[in-house]
Amino acid sequence: MRMKPADRRFHWSFLILFLMVVVIAALAIGQYTLAPSAVLKALLAPAIALPDTSSDAGIVIWNLRLPRIAAGLLVGAALAAAGTAYQGMFRNPLVSPDILGVSAGAGLGASLAILLGLSLPFVQGLAFAGGLIAVGTVYWVSGLVRRHDPILVLVLSGVAVGTLFGAGISLIKVLADPSVQLPSITFWLLGGLNGASREDLMLALPLVLAGLVPMILLRWHVNLLALADEEAAALGVDVHKLRRILIVAATLMTAAAVSIAGIVGWVGLVIPHVARLIAGSEFSRLLPTSILLGAGFLVIADTLARSVASIELPLGILTALVGAPAFIWLLARTGRSG
Amino acid sequence: MSILQTRDLAIGYHGQALGTVINLAIHPGEVVSLLGPNGSGKTTLFRTLLGVLPPVSGQVLAGGRSLQQWPQRKLANLLGYVPQAHTGLFAFTVEDVVLMGRTARLKRFGAPSARDRHIAQAMLERMGAGHLAKRRFTEISGGQRQLALIARALAQEVSLLIMDEPTASLDFGNQLKTLDAIEQLRNEGLSVLISTHQPEHALTISDRIALIRDGELKAIGPAQETVTPASLATLYDVAEHMVAGCFSNAF
Amino acid sequence: MGMNRRHFLGLMGALTATPLLPARADAAESKQLLHLFGDLPPPSQVQRVLAAGAPAGVLVYTLAPETLLGWPMSMQGEKSRVVPEAYRNLPYLGRLAGRGSTMPLEKLLALKPDVIIDVGTVDDTYLSAAKRVHQQTGIPYLLVDGSLEDSPQQLQDVGQLLGVPDRAAKLATYAEKTLGVIDTMPANRPSVYLARGPKGLETGLPGSINTEVIALAGGRNAVQVESGGNLAQVSLEQLLHWQPDMIVTQSAGFFELAQSAAAWQHLPAIKNRQCYLLPEAPFGWLDGPPSVNRLVGINWLANKLQNPGSRRSDTKLWADKAADFYQLFYGTRPGIDIFAGQTVRL
């Protein structure tokens, strides 16, 4: 069922076209009403002079919408890539980037920062650190248990540590000031890009890239993790080392994404799945497909989040609302044709 | 000189030895079959020979060096492993599965080249499965999967193939095709170590047969001399006349 | 809807308990704010009061701090510095709020309060939770309904019950005077954005309890959303569209962000230096908890809206006025340093 080269070229150009349409639509849509001509003018302004941030259109496009769209692309790509790597690594299509507790850890970090009344950089920093600590704990715990299937032990440790950190979040919610801090914590846990700025991008981009590079370099070797450990080993792969590298890479990306966007579910679970339906299971084709789809999907969800209602809808709700029905439709469709 | 050799090897898990020491050598171009009842330690021995499981004591030597000193990638150029035909979870194409055999020959951060694809296709054709290349591995039959997995080991360009019950759960025709493929490999100079539950298969293809039980090597020697109704009766804990009856009926 | 609920509440009161109406001449025309389960001891014997939540904690503390058994909210660090030592070290007891309670009922019994007081917008859930606590413990439970607008009456009613009618009258007068400032506001009202959360992008919708201060000070909520509700998230793009004249916040983290982050600098309120960080010690000026502590916020904001130009000289004056409020309500006169970190920004 693999595509012929011509099909594959079509597949890439279709994905890139999809992404471009999404970005252009996202640039044109928003609460601040701008005529398409004004959007175009503001976009083209830098070709003539510097970005024109004196007019409202210039500000909206260059300082608000573009950083936000870029953040959406980055977060979507990061979550989808991490989900793709984890699904291959855990040999399970129902795995999401949260499997090793990164979201629970980030949630605890951010909640703690809000409880302590810290400023935004600390909220983001503690969220990032919390994510790393949670996954580090999971890895450490799984190392203590030797006599079982390492994958199973990792997943179970992830569940246990995730629950532990989740309990921590609940405790902080109980302790938080119900009129001031509690709503902030709740909003953060639901995810959102409404504060996304260039500063956020500058922080998250290098981390996401740092996680992406090993995935690209090891694009072929990751495939072999779908095999039984001794099978992969006999084919020349150091399974444990490869798994360790992937966990670090995926965690770095997810934690960076979550620290600027809050907890955005569903992307890392569904997008790799959809990508697999399009591109097959081979990781070097699957990864870029997944990244392009994830980036586009998140920008769609965020554009809806900021435009369908007169207030901002939490992004995590939108990704579930858009993603779940699309996913069910795809499953049903492929079920029939397959 | 032998390709793979064990020296006073004790196998087992978590430092607990299963049975006594095993001394075994596989020579170039020979097929050795491993017979033994369920739980006799065949799988444990294979895992140890592949270097996945450390020996409890003693050594496994490949090319005169202990297996533990071999880098994983280098070892994969010497030893190939053909597992029991599994379905796998993700829908890789048969070509992709065979290409995985090239992994140890790639650059550290590389992906298969056109040459690798060419080799993969050639190996599939050698197994008579060239037409399967673009099919999904999850959607072909068990026998076809077994052939694809052998093609993968061939693409690996190894000197010794270790095959775990290659005929298990295959129908009669596919069993014969698989046995035929193994003969063909031997004729091309490869060494093969297989485990099987069917003594008649072992007798058909093997130069030597090893009997293993309770983690101990009970006997090893030329096929016809090692496998007798008496030795099988002892090995599998059945009465001798039952084995003899079964053999006379079958052949 | 309001009518229906009030009606229903009245009915509930009549059925389940003796509705307690303080003997006041204008009782007939004033709203019925109090809902009582059980029988109250006479005011002179109310010595031990348990505040069920933070708003009640503030109300009881301002009227009769000596009766307060402990704080329903954490009073640590910055917040406690303003409170006189005797009350600073009262234990943190947790809150009593149905399923959201953090105080065990047994601890409640061990404290032996004469009455439990809760303040806030009363709904059926709260009524039933209060009724249950009363039935289980036998302790009289007083629910004080109403918004910030009702605070003069809340102060007076609760003051009567706690046996401090004179003090209550003084506080109620301040409250009434404060609430009167809205009548002096011009028709063209400046718009005010309430920035909450570390990003400053959480806000109270018009009509929400969180923005009562803005409404009562004569400001117009900058958020132009018709849908009901309390808190919501908005985006910078919307703020750019709404163009608030002024931004108020209690979040020091956001205040810093608003000064430094490039994207915020395009808002006229930031450009014109009309972004203000308000104190939250011992209780917030805008919110947190939503109780009589917000009266000082109304006063400040009304003044700011009427005299947007004056800045430096204002600060000193405002430190004095705020200190007057603190003296009257919290029984302490903080030095100007208590607003350190804030004074500059007032």
Image: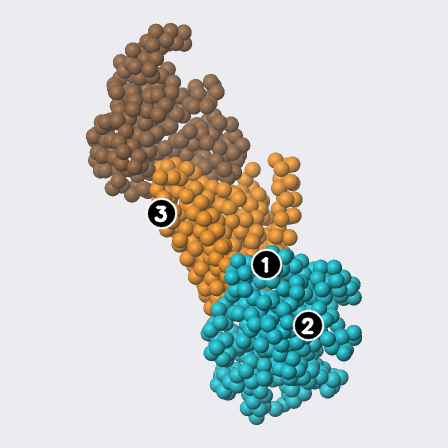
Tell me whether circle 3 and circle 2 mark residues in contact (CB < 8 Å).
no
Q: Earlier in the sequence, mark 2 or mark 1?
A: 1
Tag 2 secondary structure: loop
Q: Is residue B251 above or below residue B175?
A: above
The C terminus of chain B appears in which quarter of the rendering? top left
Q: Residues within 10 Å of mark 2 (few under 14, many from 20)?
A: some
As shown in the figure, which amino acid type bears the numbered disc 1?
Thr
How is this picture coloured?
by chain
* Chain represented in orange: A
As shown in the figure, which amino acid type bears the numbered disc 2?
Ser
* Chain represented in brown: B
Of circles 2 and 1, which is in front? 1
Residue depicted at x 68% and y 75%: C157
Distance between the alpha carbons at the discs numbered 1 and 3: 51 Å
Disc marking residue C137:
1
In the rendered structure, the residue with mark 2 lies on which chain? Answer: C
Image x and y of residue A238, in percent? 35, 44
Tell me whether circle 1 and circle 3 mark residues in contact (CB < 8 Å).
no
The N terminus of chain B appears in which quarter of the rendering? top left
Q: Is residue A80 above or below residue A45?
A: above
Chain C color in figure:
cyan
Image x and y of residue A8, in percent? 56, 46
Question: Are labels 1 and 3 on one chain?
Answer: no
* Res A262 quadrant in image: bottom right
Residue depicted at x 70% and y 62%: C17
As shown in the figure, which amino acid type bears the numbered disc 3?
Gly
Disc marking residue A143:
3
Residue depicted at x 65% and y 40%: A333
Disc marking residue C147:
2
Distance between the alpha carbons at the discs numbered 3 and 2: 57 Å
